[in-house]
Image (tube, rainbow, N blue to C red):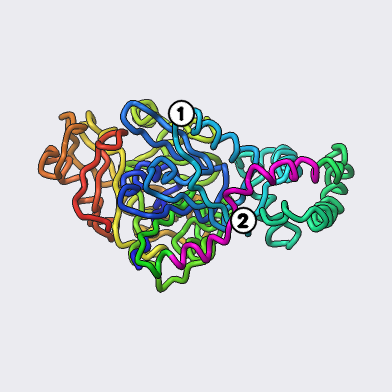
């Protein structure tokens, strides 16, 4: 039962799309198990660049079956638009499977997300405004709309009525907005039913049968470990579980079937949105990382906050996910620095701390303790093996591996599909 989980080991944007795409030719199924269209993956194939928001990266590999699991929240209009865009570029999307238990992002979820964030003002979380959080809240409050509800108009109408009973009170009396009509929402959602029908199935059954048949299944997280609702830098997190445990609940596969957990690490650190970020740079180095690394959010279009590599976070990701391997990305971006600082610990209230503090207040006040490693100036984008890298680049990778607690089994040396050094096979 070769089931692998691949997830971000920082705050997201680590290059999961490249890693998933690299493995795509070796796996039979690629499964998104959480999140929604608030996550973005960029995949470069030849001279073509694909920006994926909701679809699994495996959609670009003809031999692979892409799956949207029950733990994902789906905006039907975004999904259909993304499918249409790929079809226009000659990508076959007919193999996509969507869980009937996945929850739908409704128009009122998007409205509530946007008005709530504006209402919070300076206390805002920094959401993408795409209705993700409110949809997960509806799910937990048991007033959510699932994909399967699109195929029973009576049930759909009852559920929309129940959800809007409360939301219209909030919109009209607290936010001074117009009430949303039940019939209008139902009509819009029913309009998606026929278009989605060819893809909707019992994905839990499909995936478990595939594993029983010894098929290779790759579970793809949408965001990074530090954005996990339980294990991230709360409250500046997403509303689901991108950590490894989320793959089990978000896809309906038991933990005993997971054979390998791969964490994606960027060779430095980035973050989008609000929240603490100990190694964040506000100087020329930070701007250089942003410019050279092309650090702009695939989904949000926002500039990413940039900083040096944080080994404390990497060790934490290893622990909470049970990581067996790392895929280190964007090593090429660091070419040209004479020295490269790496955060090995924090200083909190004058004390050295080598593990991530559980206290939100302590983490907010954490100051990075750096060790400086020698840099390199040689172009590494043509490297095909670890020995092809400059000695200082090799030393940098080995240092990160020792600090992070799991072997680095692959290294990204450029954005292209073939610009990867594979040290150990993941499968």
Is 247 situated above or below 18? below
The spot of residue 172 in percent (x, y) is 88, 42
* Relative side of 197 to 3, left or right: right
Part of the protein shown in magenta: 185-209
* Relative side of 195 to 54, left or right: right
Residue 311 falls within the magenta-colored stretch: no
Is 420 situated above or below 48? below
**Sequence order check: which comes first, mark 1 or mark 2?**
1
* Relative side of 392 to 332, left or right: left
Asked whether the residues under the numbered discs 1 and 2 touch, taking CB atoms below 8 Å apart as contact, a structural biologist would say no
Q: Residue at x 65, y 38 (%)?
A: 77
Quadrant containing the C terminus is: bottom left
Q: CA distance from mark 1 to mark 2?
A: 27 Å
Question: What is the secondary structure assignment of the residue under circle 2?
Answer: loop
Which is more toward the observer, 47 or 143? 47
Report which residue position mark 2 lands on. Answer: 102
Residue 226 visible in the shown view: no
Which is more toward the observer, 126 or 92? 92
Report which residue position mark 1 lands on. Answer: 89
Residue 191 falls within the magenta-colored stretch: yes
Task: Count residues near mark 1 (Cα–Cα under 10 Å), then give few for <14, some for 14-19, many for 20+.
Answer: few
User: Residue 123: which disc?
Assistant: none
Q: Residue at x 80, y 42 (%)?
A: 187
């Amino acid at each position: 039962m070769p089931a692998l989980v691949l997830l971000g080991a920082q705050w997201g944007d680590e290059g999961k799309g490249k890693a998933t795409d690299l493995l795509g030719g070796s796996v039979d199924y690629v499964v998104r198990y959480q999140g929604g269209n608030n996550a973005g993956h960029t995949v470069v194939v030849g001279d073509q660049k694909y920006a994926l928001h909701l679809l699994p990266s495996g959609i670009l590999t003809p031999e692979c079956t892409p799956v949207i699991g029950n733990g994902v929240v789906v905006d039907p209009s975004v999904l259909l638009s993304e499918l249409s865009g790929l079809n226009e570029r000659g990508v076959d999307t007919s193999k996509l499977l969507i869980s009937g238990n996945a929850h739908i992002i409704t128009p009122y979820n998007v409205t509530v997300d946007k008005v709530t964030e504006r209402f919070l003002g300076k206390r805002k979380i920094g959401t993408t405004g795409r209705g993700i959080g409110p949809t997960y809240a509806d799910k937990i409050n048991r007033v959510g709309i699932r994909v399967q509800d699109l195929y029973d108009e009576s049930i759909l109408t009852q559920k929309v009525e129940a959800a809007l009973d409360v939301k219209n009170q909030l919109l009209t009396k607290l936010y001074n907005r117009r009430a949303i009509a039940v019939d209008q929402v139902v009509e819009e959602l029913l309009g998606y039913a026929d278009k989605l029908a060819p893809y909707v199935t019992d994905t839990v059954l499909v995936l478990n049968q595939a594993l029983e048949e010894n098929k290779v299944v790759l579970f793809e997280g949408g965001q990074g470990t530090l954005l996990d609702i339980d294990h991230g830098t709360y409250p500046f997190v997403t509303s689901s579980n991108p950590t490894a445990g989320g793959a089990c609940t978000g896809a309906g596969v038991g933990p005993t079937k997971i054979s390998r957990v791969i964490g994606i690490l960027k060779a430095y650190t980035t973050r989008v949105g609000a929240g603490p970020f100990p190694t964040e740079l506000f100087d020329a180095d930070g701007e250089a990382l942003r410019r050279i690394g092309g650090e702009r959010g695939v989904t949000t279009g926002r500039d990413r906050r940039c900083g040096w590599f944080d080994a404390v976070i990497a060790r934490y990701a290893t622990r909470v996910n049970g990581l067996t391997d790392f895929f280190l990305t964007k090593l090429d971006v660091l070419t040209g620095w004479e020295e490269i600082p790496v955060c090995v610990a924090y200083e909190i209230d004058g004390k050295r701390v080598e593990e991530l503090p559980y206290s939100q207040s302590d983490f907010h006040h954490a100051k990075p303790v750096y060790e400086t490693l020698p840099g390199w100036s040689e172009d590494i984008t043509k490297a095909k093996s670890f020995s092809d890298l400059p000695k200082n680049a090799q030393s940098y990778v080995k240092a990160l591996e020792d600090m992070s607690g799991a072997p680095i089994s692959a290294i990204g040396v450029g954005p292209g599909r073939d610009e990867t050094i594979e040290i150990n096979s993941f499968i």
